[in-house]
Image: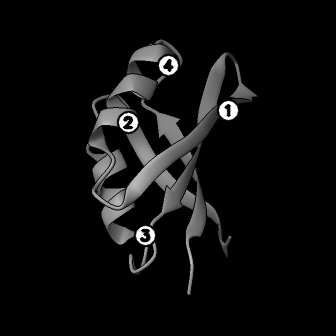
Amino acid sequence: MGEVAAKLKVMPVGADVDMEKMKEAIKSALPEGARLHGFAEEPIAFGLKALMVAVILAEGVTGTEGLEAAVAGVEGVQSVEVEEVGLL
């Protein structure tokens, strides 16, 4: 079937969260079968930024629930929302 690309919108608990530390923590929290493709910061309001995370899921990985749970468990993360999912 092929690899799957997933784009997640990660909201921090506040504007004072160190985004670089959050990026490193997300990298190390990714579950087996998922590899990081990239990060982008998206301004929301009043200095608050969302972290857009692009991840490639290996062939055979079904669903994004494990990925979402792993990222949601990172310190400083308030919420995780799947923005897009598609085949590569």
Q: Quick check: 51 left or right of 18? A: right
User: Which residue is painted at 36% across and 70% down in the image?
Assistant: 65
Compute the Cα span from label 4 to label 1: 10 Å
Say which quadrant the N terminus sits in.
bottom right
Give residue 64's mark: 3
Please name the residue that numbered disc 1 is placed on. 40
Q: Earlier in the sequence, mark 3 or mark 1?
A: 1
Q: The residue tagged with tag 4: helix, strand or loop?
A: helix
Q: Nearer the viewer, mark 2 or mark 4?
A: 2
- In the image, residue 48 lies at what x, y percent? 62, 23
Residue marked by disc 2: 26
Residue drawn 58% across the image and 61% down it: 6
Evaluate whether residue 17 shows in this view. no
Q: Is disc 1 placed on a helix, strand or loop?
A: strand
Q: What's the amino acid at mark 3?
A: Thr
Indicate which disc, 1 or 2, sits on the residue closer to the N terminus. 2
Front residue of this view, candidates 78 and 55: 55
Residue 49 shows which numbered tag?
A: none
Tell me how far mark 3 sits from mark 2, CA to CA.
15 Å
Alpha carbons under labels 2 and 4: distance apart: 10 Å
Task: Name above or below for residue 59 compared with residue 83.
Answer: below
Residue 36: x percent and y percent?
Answer: 50, 44
Q: According to the image, label 4 marks what residue?
A: 19
The relative height of residue 19 versus residue 10 in the rendered view (above or below) is above
* Figure quadrant of residue 58: bottom left
* Crowding near the residue tagged with mark 2, few <14, some 14–19, many ≥20 C-alpha atoms within 10 Å: many
Q: CA distance from mark 1 to mark 2?
A: 13 Å
